[in-house]
Image (cartoon, helix red, strand yellow):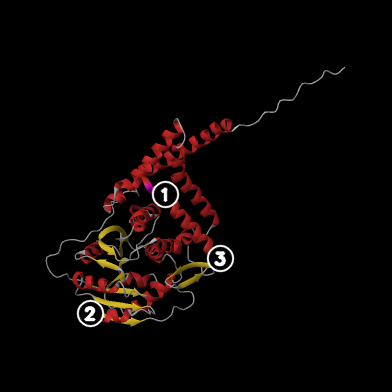
Amino acid sequence: MRRARGPRRVRLACPQARAPARGSRLRILAAVSLGLWLVLLLLPWQPWRCKERLEARAVDAAPNVDFTVLIPARNEAENIKETLSALSEAAPGASVIVLDDQSDDGTADVVRASPHPDVRVIAGSAPPGGWAGKLWALEQGFGHVATSRVLLLDADILLEPGMPEALLDKAAAGYALVSVLAEPCWRGPWARWLLPAFVYFFKLIYPFALANRPAGPVAAAAGGVVLADCAALRDIGAFSAWRDAIIDDCTLARHMKRSRHRCFIGLTRGARSLRGQGRRSIVSMVARSAYVQLRESPWILLGATALLLLAYAVPVAAVAFAGPTRWLGIAAWIALATAYLPALLYYRRNPFAAILLPAAAMFYLGMTWYSALRHLSGTRSSWKGREYKKEVREEQ
């Protein structure tokens, strides 16, 4: 006879049993995140620090400049008057060429009324197929440059007195390309929160110490303020050599380094942006080139997403758990805030904003995905009313 079986026991998984497993996995991720930040802090070239600088120097006499200032301007009536007024003090002896890139806001009239003693306006034409708008404007203006050096200056950048001399001194030290990252405009809460992080992330992607080495693996420039040797520019084919580049400044530096011309990039407070940045304009600025920066690869996008989540989201999530997981999360959060502090202190921002870096990182991650989704819809990049379709490829 078969023995009667009792009722079968049903084992139910309970949330309390799964919580330790989740905490264990998060503890491992938090440890990896902490290790990642410790490695970054100990890298020999220290990309998180602000060592590479070029500040305006004191001048006693009228500056002696031997360059032409070339300003591409598209609908810049709001800012270019102040830019030219600052130039009239910082570089009164320089010849200034403003390439009016089909503006419809009276930019050319504002330029003609400028107090600068030597400024002329050149009416630009629409970019031919395969050209990015700014590069076509620079190409048109460069044909009118007669000096040995040219200062490529954005129409919204204010140069302090003594900054042209600092640029020329660096160029005289043997650099064919000298660029500085202008200090952002801090007007508005979005700018004060996000723009220090923008500079910080730019320095992580393009470590300045490596970019400034002649044989370094990194090439970088900041397109707002670039002093270039004209002979070196012609040697690399001028702007037509990378006519379709979306990230035009770093592409310029890459061509220079390939031709064995020395390049320098640094931070400065001697050049300031006049352009106020709200949430929408910051999104537009980042989305313009974020996916291009990732070589328009979905795999690199996924890898970058995983890396950002590991570096910034995991420490915050780990703090919500008890025991070793929490302490690992706190340590990683302290490490990432420590790496961000030099940028905040350099720009005289509130140092306590360092603890908000994870939120800024997630915001930039969202903008990067927006850039990628826009690319999938057919628009590779968009800037100042011009769209660049994704079939136009940038040299990698």
Relative to 221, is 3 on the left or the right?
right
Q: Which residue is mark 1?
A: 359
Image quarter of residue 336: top left
Please report contact status of discs 3 and 2: CB closer than 8 Å, yes or no: no
Q: Which residues are magenta?
A: 356-360
Pinpoint residue 196: horizontal percent, then vertical percent: 34, 54
Pinpoint residue 238: horizontal percent, then vertical percent: 38, 72
Assess disc 1: are there few (<14), some (14-19) or many (≥20) residues with their C-alpha within 10 Å of its C-alpha: some
Nearer to us in this view, 193 or 181 = 193
Query: Between tags 1 and 3, which lies in front?
Result: 1
Whichever of callouts 3 and 2 sits on the residue coming sooner in the sequence is 2
Q: CA distance from mark 1 to mark 2?
A: 47 Å
Amino acid marked by disc 2? Asp
Q: Which residue is mark 3?
A: 377
Q: Residue at x 48, y 65 (%)?
A: 395
Pinpoint residue 249: horizontal percent, then vertical percent: 38, 65
Amino acid marked by disc 1? Ala
Amino acid marked by disc 3? Ser
Most extreme residue toward the front is 7
